[in-house]
Image: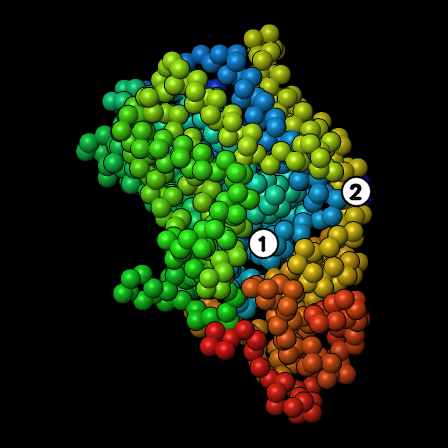
Amino acid sequence: MSFPDFISGLVNLALVGLFAGFTAFRLRARLMPGWSGSPARLVEAVLGVGLLVISSEMLGLFGLLEPLPLVILLGLLALVAWLTVIPRPAGPGDPVPPAPAVSTAAQILAFVAAFVVFAQWGAFTSYNLDHGITNFDSVWYHMPFAADMARTGSVTGFFHTETVFVNWFYPQNSELIHAVGIVLTGRDFVSIFINMGWLALGLLAGWCVGRPYDRPHLTMLGVAVLMAAHTLVVREPGTAKNDVMAAALVLASAAIMLNRSAARPDPPGRVSPDWAMAVGGLAIGLAAGTKVTALAPALLMTLSVLYATVPRRRLRAAGVWLGSALVGGGWWYLRNLVATGNPIPQITRVGPVELPGPEQLQFGRPDFAVLHYLTDGGIWKDYFVPGLNQGFGEAWPLLFALVIGGLFLVMLTAHGRLTRTHGAVALLAILAYLVTPLSAAGPEGDPSAFAINLRFLIPALGLAVVLVPLSSWFDRGWRRYALGVLLVVLFIFTSASDPVISAPGRTFGVAIALLFVAMPFAVWLLRERLSPHLRLPPLAVGLGLAIAVFAVFAWPIQKSYFEDRYQDFELADGSGLTAPYRWAEGITDSKIALAGTTAGFKGYGFWGRDLSNDVVYIGRDASHGGFDAIGNCGEFARAVNAADPDYLVTSPFLNFNEYSRPIASPENAWAENDPALVKVMPRVKPSHANRPVTVWKVTGPMDPSLCARLGAGSDFVPGLKDG
């Protein structure tokens, strides 16, 4: 990236951030003027995210997701907000959440926890800065979806990454935000840091949950325990995975509504339909529009809010909450409904009711849920206990005992109906995890994906861990101190501390923590002295200074990133795509077709350094939005000709059950049979001779008639469900 391009991208980012942030600030000040401090900042953050997502969706409906339209649209919204044409809400006044004073010791405890977690995440972010994004789900569909939205400027299409799963039906709020970063800068550098923002939002929400009840440090420490756990730290920082985004937004929704329920004039624990409820609904809608696994907490929280609404106002509350939620996350489900007749096409049966959805031709791995093995002692010994040790540290029994026992305390003793009901919501959401498909994925008796998919539990567990301190059992005295000590112990023993101590990126991690935690905290501590000179909230000023300092160093950091991107790395599964990735870094403005699911599951590297390549997977459309593999040489040749690529990449079928033993796929033999395809890269290296990944230059149309030279056995579809 040239320096002028870098400055242009920086200006675009600054304008979008300033316009969205200013509009969110003015909206909150106009519609919720009584809110101040951290809950106000949380409301503004949710509104800012909502403005960005909704504006991008609106432009994407017309294929206009581009820098200038986005800047103009957000600029116009900021102008409207500045002209104060937004009417003040009618009614008796703005309910103000209580804000008890927080002790210095509590502030320091929260600061230390946030500093350590940011340092951990920064250390892992450093790895991706050194090598490029290599996380499996990120290169499989998160980043390809984002890159396709950025290339087309549209949010209406379905981008097919492979033919085994149907992830193009997933909600894509997180991918849309990555797409905005790509649109504004032309590269994926911003994507490396997006999850750090969700980490900050989650910690802020954790603080806000306990603020009205004089225990924000305990609720924030609960979030820190979860965010520092291995299951998040090793997969979320510096990648495009969206578990942390969904969890942070669920927490934000809960925090806003719990602050509202603590306010007057409504009875304690009750809520009325107002702007706070609208923002809470927006947050939960944004979460549901991010990840399907957030749907269970979203549905349960909806029922909880309506149950806690003051009598005779539930119908209006339903309209406010559900309307805001649909605005935040409804687009992706509406798109699915229009295309297939089913808002969640992955689910084709609910009890005896059959729903429309694509019939999948190929089979990746069995989608067993944890409940399938819940009473199997052998599975617990060989998979569940080691997986929980890996995901949450060896103190996981203590963590789950605190969560489950604490939720019962919340349901029995917490202040107010909404808080008690939220305790039931968190418990039910955890139980819903037990029946979540793929939570124990793998062959019968071999749930090898259990540890990886513990992340499905994160939104529910995050909600649970912040609610436990709200039990009145911890209102004062030794019990509160004991809970604080217990949370500190859990933070230490469930925390992935290696990144801070020994990881190569530890220096970068500490620097990130100093910049984005220590600097805002210092400004906040000095707020009394600085307040005569500040026109903005101290926390916002501190964060703005941190961003400004980071922007100064961003030029050399991104320069190093793009020089090293996909040059010195090795994909963990040994898929044979390392050399093709390096080759693709030098390819620009070309169309690259992929065949064989190994390339499809690892497709992001073929977009190139500047993401200017058009990457497509070769397959055929099927009913109800499906996309199937082609098992016939002649049909394959015609599909390649229709795609008209500059290059074709052939690869084997990815074996999810044993990555080191890929399954033969016929596309390489079909390509080798046609002289229109010239081999650019041979089989990657001798050690990968059993898993060929080949790059072909397409010099002309393939000739389907040449397929007759091949034997009948050359036509087949690997991984058939009935095979």
Q: Is residue 408 left or right of residue 674?
A: left
Question: How are the colours assigned in the image?
Answer: rainbow
Q: Which mark is residue 420?
A: none
Q: Compared to 145, does 622 lie above or below? A: below
Q: Which mark is residue 559?
A: 2
- Decide if residue 251 is in sight here: no
Residue in view at x 64 percent, y 43 percent:
238
Label 1: state its secondary structure.
helix
Q: Compared to 165, does 461 lie above or below? A: above
Q: Earlier in the sequence, mark 1 or mark 2?
A: 1
The amino acid type, in three-letter code, at marker 2 is Lys
Residue holding disc 1: 137
Q: Residues within 10 Å of mark 1 (few under 14, many from 20)?
A: some
Residue in view at x 34 percent, y 25 percent:
471
Q: Is residue 187 left or right of residue 623?
A: right
- Decide if residue 683 is in sight here: yes
Label 2: state its secondary structure.
helix
Q: Are marks 1 and 2 in contact (CB under 8 Å)?
A: no
Query: Where is residue 187 drawn, in percent x and y?
Result: 70, 48
Query: Where is residue 387 drawn, in percent x and y?
Result: 52, 48
Q: Residues within 10 Å of mark 2 (few under 14, many from 20)?
A: some
